[in-house]
Amino acid sequence: MKKTDLAKNDAKKLMGKMVVPGAATFGPSAGPVIDKREQRKRDQALGLVPFAVKLNDDLVKRLHAVATERGLDLNTVVADVLAKGLDAR
């Protein structure tokens, strides 16, 4: 492996560490970091089930806009929209 290849690999590793969620948050405003296993246990206790779907980009943007407009998280907005849509049938 060439010296330049080693330098490229080191740079990729460094850039990957910078992109990791939570890497830019530090100090008192960062808040506690919750383990994924702990988060899963909390969600199960609340009766939440993971449900992955693929949506059109425009639809996702609309959902994000509604969430920011209402001041709610995306999960709550999607649950409300689905419930209203199913109830309307």
Image (cartoon, helix red, strand yellow):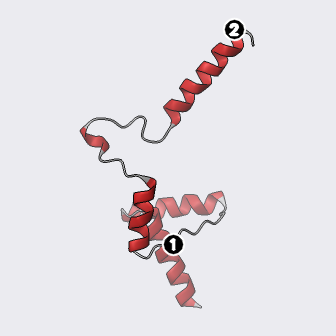
Q: Residue furthest top?
A: 3
User: What label sits on residue 30 in the rendered view?
Assistant: none
Which one is in front, 74 or 39?
A: 39
User: Can you tell which quarter of the image residue 89 is in?
Assistant: bottom right
Q: Amino acid at mark 2?
A: Lys
Mark 2: secondary structure:
helix
In the rendered image, which residue does mark 2 sit on?
3
Side (left or right) of 56 relative to 66: right
Q: Residues within 10 Å of mark 1 (few under 14, many from 20)?
A: few
Q: Amino acid at mark 1?
A: Val
Residue 14 in the image: x percent, y percent? 54, 24
> What residue lies at 39% left-to-right and 74% top-to-bottom?
46
Residue 43 in the image: x percent, y percent? 42, 68
> What residue lies at 48% left-to-right and 74% top-to-bottom?
79
Residue 68 in the image: x percent, y percent? 41, 59
CA gap between label 1 and label 2 equals 49 Å
User: What label sits on residue 49 in the rendered view?
Assistant: 1
